[in-house]
Amino acid sequence: MDGVLPGYEVDSSTWSYLSFLLIVAVYFRFTRVWSLRNLDLSLLLLLSPALLLVRYESAFAYPWIFSITGLIFLRLILDRQFTRRPLFPQNMNTAGLIWLGGATFTFLMAIVVTFSPPEPTLESVRRGQQLIEREDNSGEQGGKNHR
């Protein structure tokens, strides 16, 4: 992001924390802390630390994902048992959600445009292009192998 905001560097952990704070600010119902909406939001937010642990190759990540996913599944199964209450008023109006989505899209696209992809990704793209063009990489025929 140096091209857009000089000196502004954000790693995946920081993005996770910033996203967490923003999601809580927008969707969490502080007037009704013990609501199903907050439970669902909390369960979904509990997945993000596990995804960071997967990124950093921690052995604790997969049991965490499995248990949180099990709790989400249990919550979905028990959903029919809960009585329906009146609909909550929305936290944000349409204009606010469009602004939030646009700002998020802009920051994410700034990362895509300014950073080059890692070398393994580029190598995968090259191999895919060679497969599409049906090139022979074995070195035996030295040209294109058309079938």
Image: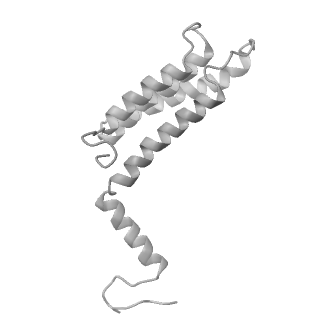
> Residue at 34% of width from left, 46% of height from top?
4
Q: Quadrant of residue 101?
A: top right
Q: Is residue 44 above or below residue 10?
A: above
Is residue 49 in view from this perspective?
A: no
Q: Quadrant of residue 92?
A: top right
Q: Is residue 6 above or below residue 31?
A: below
Of residues 51 and 69, the one nearer the viewer is 51
Residue 31: x and y, percent?
Answer: 58, 7
Q: Is residue 33 above or below residue 62?
A: above
Of residues 63 and 130, the one nearer the viewer is 130
Of residues 18 and 121, the one nearer the viewer is 18
> Residue at 31% of width from left, 57% of height from top?
118
Residue 127: x and y, percent?
Answer: 39, 72
> Residue at 32% of width from left, 53% of height from top?
115
Q: How many marks?
A: 0
Q: Is residue 71 above or below residue 31?
A: below
